[in-house]
Each structure stands twice: as structure tokens, then as C-alpha cells.
Image: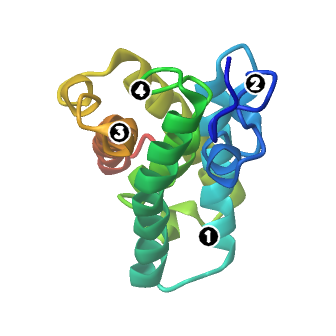
Amino acid sequence: MQDSPDHDAAGSPPWFDPAVLAATGGGLGRIPLAPGTFGAAAGVIVSLAVAAAQFPPVAEAAVIVAINLAGIPICTAAARRLGRGTDPGAIVYDEMASLPLGLLAVPAAARSTLPEAAALLLAAFLLHRVFDIAKPFPCRQLEHLPAGLGIMADDWGAALWMAVILTVCRWSGWV
């Protein structure tokens, strides 16, 4: 294989390229078994970090939306550099960013005490994984969008499904 900007002399992907490093969650996506699950777990940590900053709700939403929008060019560049199809399994930025996006549907007050926050985060994690794997409408269709937009958008669909279920559960008093 020739040297290219996308691979080193040995033909290995450029794991330490900034876009690849970000898109793989600092290397979490390189875990051979269920990298998306590890990405979603990192999404829980992102949610906790943003919540710990105690932004006003509008600012919290703006930060999370910005993280998600930044994922489009990051995932586009990483997919091109990894050269493993349109949505390489090593890219987990989409899970890391979209899980906190879905949690915006749940008021911060519901996430304020440890038992409630833990139950909510566990439910969000499990629901996000189910919908990301099952890809109900429109998730499957969204993944066909071009490049990083498709990588991110199907997970936004999973986050939307997660948000709907969490909202119904909150209204019902289950979570």
C-alpha cells in the first residue's frame, strides 16, 4: 500500500489523527467488542460533565447541540481517514454526543438527586443502545445521509426515540 495522508507507511489507520482520535472517543472505538456500547457509556459521562457545569437550561442545550453539530465534520474526516465504509464501527462520537442530546427532554430537576439521576442515566443508556441497534424509523433512513451527517443523524433518531420513551416514563412516574 502506498503512503497516503490517510494511512501510515505500514498501511495502518492514523489512530492519532485529531479527527480520528475525537471520533473514536480517545480510542474507545478501538475496543473490539461492542464499541458503540462504550461510546454510549461515554455519552453518560458527557451528560454528567455538562450537568456538573450547572449551565442554565438554554446554555446546556446550546453546548450539547454544538457538540452534536461538531460531530458532522469530525466524523466525516475520521470516516475518510479510516477508510472503512460510510460508518466505521470505531467511530463512537455519534453515541457519545447523541445520548446527552436525548436527555435534554428530561428536566434538570429530574436529574438532581443521585438515585433518580442514576436510574434515569441507566434507562437512557439502555434505551439509546436498543434504538441505535434496532434502528426504528427514521433511524435506518437517516444513516443514508452523506458522510458525517449520516453517521450522526441515525443516532439523533435513536436519541429522539429515547427522549420520547423517557418523557412517557416521567409522565407515568416510572423514572
Dot 1 or dot 2, earlier in sequence: 2
Select label 2 or label 3 by which is in front: 2
**Residue matched to label 2:** 12
What's the residue type where badge 1 is placed? Ala
Question: Which label is found at residue 63?
Answer: none
Select label 1 or label 2 by which is in front: 2
Picture coordinates of residue 156 (x, y %)?
34, 44
What's the residue type where badge 4 is placed? Asp
What's the residue type where badge 3 is placed? Ala
**Residue matched to label 3:** 147
How far is mark 3 from mark 1, CA to CA?
30 Å
How far is mark 2 from mark 3, CA to CA?
21 Å
**Residue matched to label 4:** 132
Q: Residue at x 76, y 45 (%)?
A: 26
Q: Is residue 103 visible?
A: no
At label 3, counting other C-alpha atoms closer than 10 Å, the crowd grade (few under 14, some 14-19, many 20 or more) is many
Dot 2 or dot 4, earlier in sequence: 2
Picture coordinates of residue 50 (x, y %)?
61, 69
Select label 1 or label 4 by which is in front: 4
Q: Is residue 17 visible?
A: yes
Coloration of the structure image: rainbow
How far is mark 4 from mark 3, CA to CA?
18 Å
Q: Quadrant of residue 4?
A: top right
158, above or below 17, in the image: above
79, above or below 114, in the image: above
Q: Secondary structure at mark 3?
A: helix
